[in-house]
């Protein structure tokens, strides 16, 4: 990549990639064009650079102060980029696996099994990519990290499967009609992602396997998302999602918008209709008006979720509850202090309430949090939450908590907190702690725990959860990862180990994977275990 040199740029054959001079300093960065998507014929790029000075929490931008870190419309201009025109590139990624399984859960003991499949990627142009996968293998994905859930709502988990990850953020609308974790193991998948003119798009179609244990039939999923740039820095989007199986279907249509009304004012909204069923009870929408920048945020939002909306949309999406007229607001502010004691003080407060469509109050909540960040990188946080929930009866809950942390604004950190209160007719005490540490340039460790006590605890839900991750990188393409966790309430112990060697980066690799899962089986109430060993080999083949 070549472009016009900026004033003060150092030239000459003896220059270094980064160096300090009497007038200041400079650094050079190389961004491979193959790692980003861009319009081929563009000759003026929006660009900005931010420098974060950790020791005094200062942030500075190359193109002046901005109200949002990623608002390109407030960035500078880069001109003179000379990009060679490239033709489409086709790459094949065949893989083979050998699997050994010894399991009490599936009654498979000492069995070896081979399998094969593959992916095809076609780089149509610099801004548009097509993918096809057949019989994909997700052996390199470890189990989800266990969490304590103090609500009666489903928890959302991140997508870790590579096929679904690219472009998946486009579906992250507030009323989320596509949640890829609803899709189990797939037989095949096709996907088109990228940008055409002013249109960002993501189109995928997959065929999912039948899951007899969950009474889930073989199904076909389609998700289509397009988002158009409008005005100077605003967008309008459209989403279509469908799940079809022998004897039934669910589908939804969604329209959304984000209007940046100046530097700090923002208007957002979304409307979703779903089928089958009558229109009114199977639709939803929200309107939100906000003012925000890097220092403060406040908004007010109204949402209307139909009485039967969740039944349809949760076949493909993530909706925690329905049948609600909801009002919520949020206030956040950060005071940056010129003090020998504090770096900043952060305040956050949220208020919400919703009623059923019959006018019955189902929930209200008040939440407040204050975080004091000291100059020595220690932070102290306090919060309080008071809410009401109506399910089969009325519940009046409250939670309070404190947290002490060190260096929590950076990757290497440690924190310990305590939550207490009254939750769904039970007292509870919850201790949580976590730490991340890079012990050497090659070795990193993460650890967290959650210990909760309920009283009364007739269902034996009190538990201790430990989670440990260890990473060791011999080189950037040769590494070992170990992930382990336990849950005392379930008598569960899970261990996942991976050895990876990318002999032809980024996707030509050999993986050795071992998992062990110990769990109390229901209804036998006996301890079962499963041991699985994988060998996976992937080799990329580039076809010009």
Image: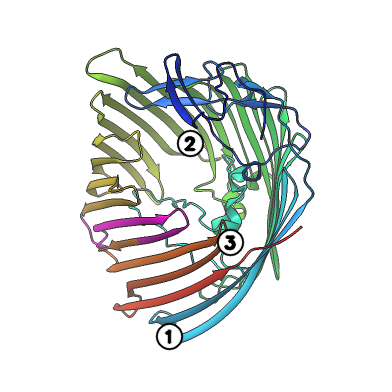
- Along the viewing direction, whichever of 19 and 266 lies nearer the viewer: 19
Give coordinates of residue 474: x percent, y percent.
39, 57
Residue 107's disc number: 1
Residue 183's disc number: 3
Give coordinates of residue 4: x percent, y percent.
67, 23
Give coordinates of residue 61: x percent, y percent.
51, 20
Task: Tell me whether the residue at label 2 lies in contact with that at label 1, contact meaning CB atoms closer than 8 angstroms.
Answer: no
Note whether residue 278 is visible: no
From the image, which quarter does the N terminus lie in?
top right
Note whether residue 111 is visible: yes
Q: Which residues are magenta?
A: 456-482
Question: Of helix, strand and loop, which mostly describes the magenta segment?
Answer: strand
Neighbor class of circle 2 (other Cα within 10 Å; few <14, some 14-19, many 20+) is many
The residue that mark 2 highlights is 354
Mark closest to the chain's N terminus, 2 or 3? 3
Give coordinates of residue 489: x percent, y percent.
26, 63
- Along the viewing direction, whichever of 45 and 402 lies nearer the viewer: 45
Neighbor class of circle 3 (other Cα within 10 Å; few <14, some 14-19, many 20+) is many
* Quarter assignment of residue 244: bottom right
Task: Tell me whether the residue at label 1 lies in contact with that at label 3, contact meaning CB atoms closer than 8 angstroms.
Answer: no
- Along the viewing direction, whichever of 530 and 55 lies nearer the viewer: 55
The number of callouts visible is 3
* Circle nearer the viewer, 2 or 3: 3
* Quarter assignment of residue 189: bottom right
């Amino acid at each position: 990549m070549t472009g016009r040199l900026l004033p003060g740029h150092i030239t000459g054959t003896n220059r270094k990639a980064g160096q300090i001079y009497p007038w200041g300093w400079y650094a050079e960065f190389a961004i491979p064009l193959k790692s980003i998507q861009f319009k081929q014929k563009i000759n003026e790029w929006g660009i900005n650079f931010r420098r974060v000075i950790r020791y005094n929490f200062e942030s500075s931008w190359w193109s002046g102060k901005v109200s949002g870190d990623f608002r390109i419309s407030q960035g500078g201009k880069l001109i003179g980029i000379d990009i060679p025109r490239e033709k489409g590139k086709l790459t094949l990624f065949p893989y083979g696996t050998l699997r050994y399984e010894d399991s009490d859960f599936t009654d498979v003991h000492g069995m070896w099994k081979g399998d094969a499949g593959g992916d095809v990627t076609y780089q149509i142009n610099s801004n548009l990519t097509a993918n096809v996968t057949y019989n994909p293998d997700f052996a390199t994905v470890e189990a989800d990290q266990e969490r304590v859930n103090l609500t009666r709502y489903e928890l959302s988990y991140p997508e870790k499967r590579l096929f679904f990850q690219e472009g998946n953020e486009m579906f992250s609308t507030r009323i989320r009609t596509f949640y890829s974790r609803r899709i189990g193991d797939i037989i095949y998948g096709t996907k088109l992602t990228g940008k055409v003119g002013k249109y960002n798009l993501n189109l995928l179609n997959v065929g999912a396997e039948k899951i007899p244990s969950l009474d889930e039939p073989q199904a076909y999923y389609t998700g289509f998302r397009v988002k158009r740039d409008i005005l100077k820095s605003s967008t309008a989007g459209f989403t279509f999602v469908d799940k079809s199986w022998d004897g039934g279907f669910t589908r939804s249509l969604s329209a959304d918008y984000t209007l940046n009304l100046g530097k700090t004012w923002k208007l957002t909204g979304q409307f979703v209709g779903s089928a089958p069923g009558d229109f009114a009870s199977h639709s939803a929408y929200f309107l939100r008006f906000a003012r925000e920048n890097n220092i403060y945020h406040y908004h007010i939002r109204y949402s209307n979720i139909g009485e039967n909306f969740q039944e349809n949309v949760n076949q493909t999406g993530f909706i925690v509850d329905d049948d609600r007229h909801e009002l919520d607001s949020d206030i956040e502010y950060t005071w940056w202090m010129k003090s020998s004691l504090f770096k900043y003080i952060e305040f956050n407060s949220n208020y919400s309430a919703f009623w059923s469509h019959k006018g019955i109050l189902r929930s209200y909540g008040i939440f407040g949090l204050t975080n004091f960040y000291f100059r020595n990188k220690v932070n102290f946080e306090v919060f309080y939450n008071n809410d009401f929930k109506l399910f089969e009866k009325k519940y009046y809950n409250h939670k309070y908590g404190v947290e002490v942390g060190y260096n929590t604004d950076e990757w290497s950190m440690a924190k310990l907190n305590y939550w207490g209160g009254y939750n769904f007719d039970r007292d509870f005490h919850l201790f949580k702690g976590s730490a991340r540490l890079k012990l050497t340039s090659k070795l990193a460790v993460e650890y967290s725990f959650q210990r909760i006590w309920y009283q009364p605890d007739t269902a034996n839900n009190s538990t201790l959860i430990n989670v440990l991750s260890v990473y060791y990188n011999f080189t950037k393409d040769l590494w070992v990862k170990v992930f382990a966790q336990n849950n005392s309430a379930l008598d569960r112990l899970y261990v996942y180990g991976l050895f990876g060697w990318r002999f032809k980066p980024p996707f030509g690799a050999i993986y050795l994977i071992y998992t062990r899962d110990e769990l109390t089986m229901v209804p036998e109430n006996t301890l079962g275990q499963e041991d699985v060993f994988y060998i996976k080999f992937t080799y990329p083949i580039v076809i010009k």
